[in-house]
């Protein structure tokens, strides 16, 4: 069947390239006015008023679930035409996770977003987030070192050799003992780097990838190299985990050339300025396709240690996996609103609220002691993610793309200062966030008045959900951050050493910071 325009009443649209019998059967029964009303909810990739490429009606029918058919009884004319309900895949769910809300629409996959026929700068930024920011996936997945340029694979060898010597099952408050541990670990890593890493070859490979031959290093490989270098730099910076005050007292650390030279290429490629890792390079890129960790800081420790480290990363990545459809819906709501299709924009925001609600269920269902051990998290998961040198902070939950996306889309101010955001957020993430900030959908909806009352209602519902999450997170955070760790000064990874004499004072300080952001979420 050659592509052709099919006209149904007031709508003319291009049909699919394929000779699908089911398409013809559906066309015989289609009421395009009904399609216009419900299609943005069922398949957010499609807006009939803005389609630029042929699409397939039967592929849309396949995406319908039984729950959606029940929710939208007006679809009885379409759903029976397709013999088998949707089997469209979504992100894999772990056996112990809360079951997703069946009313949530079929999630957008990365492929859906990359092939979205709609055209808009915000969608371009979302596509770039996936393609260049995540190596064709969001969140990224750990890449095998076998796919890296050969000279860079030595860094994987080095980290696996030193990783078992980084954690200690029992921390000490003896500064001399801790200094010996730190110095021994750093000496071991320097020896491994000198033995395995040919710096001239590393430089040549990175120059080639950054310049004349970008195909010599895929974006997924770049992320994998950034990941292992982040683990090497953070473990070298601290020398032992749980981190200790002896390392916190250091004003500067001289890193081996093998870690500095390669790091400068990572900063240039990803657009970050921090000398330490970030949420992308320490967590997002560390989860394999089978939901296990590529690199660990709890090697040789108990199953409880390993589980806590694993779930800390699963929680972050799981949120972004579940919220990717929301990102897509946010972009679509902007496209529809700009095109004057208020009904489609409303449907997109309504679906976004459902996706967010389901993601928050996953978050609070996962942030429990059975998965994130309250006595182990602060020492063995949070500590090494700090930095503290040269006034540079480490990573924190506030750098999560999920919550920055919500704040940016909803106009929750103040926005981070650009030079601070570029410390830890790669260019692709900043471009996506800035596209949402620049559009400022809530401000545009306010200007439209009563005409956009339904849109305002859905936007307010998103704000309400975010406020409720922030209130709940304040209480959950207190349990984890208040664990006493006598071997170190009071500190959070994201704001480094806190000027507080006790854990209670530090918690008070943190609650003030979080409370301020809650007050701004209006």
Image (spheres, grey):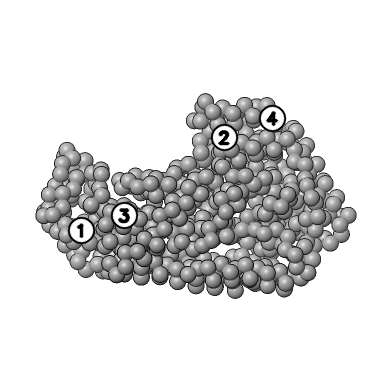
Name which of mark 1 and mark 4 comes first in the sequence: 1
Q: Is residue 206 left or right of residue 4?
A: right
Residue pointed to by mark 3: 338
Could you give the CA–CA distance between mark 2 and mark 4, rounded to whole angstroms? Answer: 15 Å
Residue pointed to by mark 1: 35
Q: Secondary structure at mark 4?
A: helix
From what the image shows, is residue 252 above or below residue 364? above
Could you give the CA–CA distance between mark 2 and mark 3, rounded to whole angstroms? Answer: 43 Å
Which of the 4 quarters of the picture holds residue 462? bottom left
Q: Which mark is on residue 199?
A: 4
Q: Name the quadrant of the N terminus.
A: top left
The crowding category of the residue bearing disc 1, from other C-alpha atoms within 10 Å (few below 14, some 14 to 19, many at least 20), is: some
Q: Which mark is on residue 148?
A: 2
Residue 147 position in % (x across, y down): 54, 35
Nearest to the observer: residue 384 or residue 188? 384
Nearest to the observer: residue 521 or residue 111? 521
Residue 370 position in % (x across, y down): 60, 68
Could you give the CA–CA distance between mark 3 and mark 4, rounded to whole angstroms? Answer: 51 Å
The crowding category of the residue bearing disc 3, from other C-alpha atoms within 10 Å (few below 14, some 14 to 19, many at least 20), is: some
The answer to whether the residues at label 3 and label 4 have Cβ atoms under 8 Å apart is: no
The structure residue drawn at horizontal position 64% and vertical position 37%, both measured from the top left corner, is 264
Q: Secondary structure at mark 3?
A: helix
Q: Is residue 162 left or right of residue 454?
A: right
The crowding category of the residue bearing disc 2, from other C-alpha atoms within 10 Å (few below 14, some 14 to 19, many at least 20), is: many
Residue 506 position in % (x across, y down): 71, 69
Q: Is residue 21 visible?
A: yes
């Amino acid at each position: 069947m050659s592509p052709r325009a099919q006209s149904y009443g007031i709508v003319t649209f291009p049909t699919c390239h394929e000779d699908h019998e089911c398409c013809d059967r559906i066309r015989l029964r289609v009421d395009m006015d009904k399609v216009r009303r419900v299609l943005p909810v069922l398949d957010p990739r499609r807006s009939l008023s803005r389609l630029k490429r042929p699409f397939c009606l039967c592929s849309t029918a396949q995406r319908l679930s039984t729950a959606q058919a029940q929710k939208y009884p007006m679809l009885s004319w379409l759903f029976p035409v397709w013999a088998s309900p949707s089997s469209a895949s979504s992100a894999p769910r772990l056996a112990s996770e809360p079951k997703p809300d069946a009313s949530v629409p079929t999630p957008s996959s990365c492929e859906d977003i990359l092939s979205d026929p709609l055209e808009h700068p915000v969608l371009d930024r979302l596509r770039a987030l996936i393609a260049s920011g995540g190596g064709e996936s969001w969140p990224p997945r750990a890449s095998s070192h076998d796919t890296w340029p050969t000279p860079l694979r030595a860094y994987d060898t080095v980290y696996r050799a030193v990783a078992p010597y980084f954690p200690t099952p029992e921390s000490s408050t003896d500064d001399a003992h801790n200094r010996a541990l730190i110095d021994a670990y750093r000496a071991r890593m320097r020896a491994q780097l000198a033995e395995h890493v040919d710096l001239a070859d590393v430089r040549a490979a990175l120059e080639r990838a950054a310049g004349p031959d970008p195909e010599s290093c895929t974006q997924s490989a770049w992320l994998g190299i950034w990941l292992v270098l982040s683990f090497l730099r953070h473990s070298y910076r601290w020398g032992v985990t749980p981190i200790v005050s002896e390392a916190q007292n250091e004003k500067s650390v001289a890193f081996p050339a093998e870690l500095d030279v390669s790091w400068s290429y990572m900063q240039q490629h990803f657009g970050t300025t921090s000398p330490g890792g970030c949420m992308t390079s320490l967590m997002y890129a560390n989860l394999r396709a089978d939901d296990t960790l590529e690199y660990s800081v709890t090697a040789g420790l108990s199953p409880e240690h390993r589980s806590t480290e694993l779930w800390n990363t699963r929680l972050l990545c799981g949120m972004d996996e579940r919220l990717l459809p929301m990102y897509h819906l946010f972009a679509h709501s902007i496209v529809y609103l700009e095109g004057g299709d208020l009904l489609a924009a409303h449907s997109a925001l309504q679906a976004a609220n459902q996706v967010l609600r389901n993601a928050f269920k996953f978050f609070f269902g996962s942030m429990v002691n059975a998965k994130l051990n309250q006595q182990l998290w602060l020492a063995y998961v949070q500590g090494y993610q700090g930095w503290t040198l040269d006034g540079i902070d480490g990573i924190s939950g506030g750098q999560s793309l999920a919550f920055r996306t919500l704040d940016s889309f909803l106009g929750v101010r103040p926005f981070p200062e650009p030079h601070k955001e570029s410390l830890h957020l790669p260019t692709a993430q900043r471009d996506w966030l800035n596209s949402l900030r620049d559009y400022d959908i809530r401000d545009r909806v306010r200007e439209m008045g009563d005409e956009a009352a339904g849109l305002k209602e859905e936007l307010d519902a998103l704000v309400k959900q975010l406020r409720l999450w922030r209130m709940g997170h304040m209480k959950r955070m207190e349990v984890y951050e208040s664990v006493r760790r006598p071997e170190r000064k009071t500190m959070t990874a994201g704001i480094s050493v806190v000027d507080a004499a006790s854990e209670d004072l530090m918690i008070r300080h943190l609650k003030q910071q979080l409370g301020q952001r809650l007050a701004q979420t209006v």
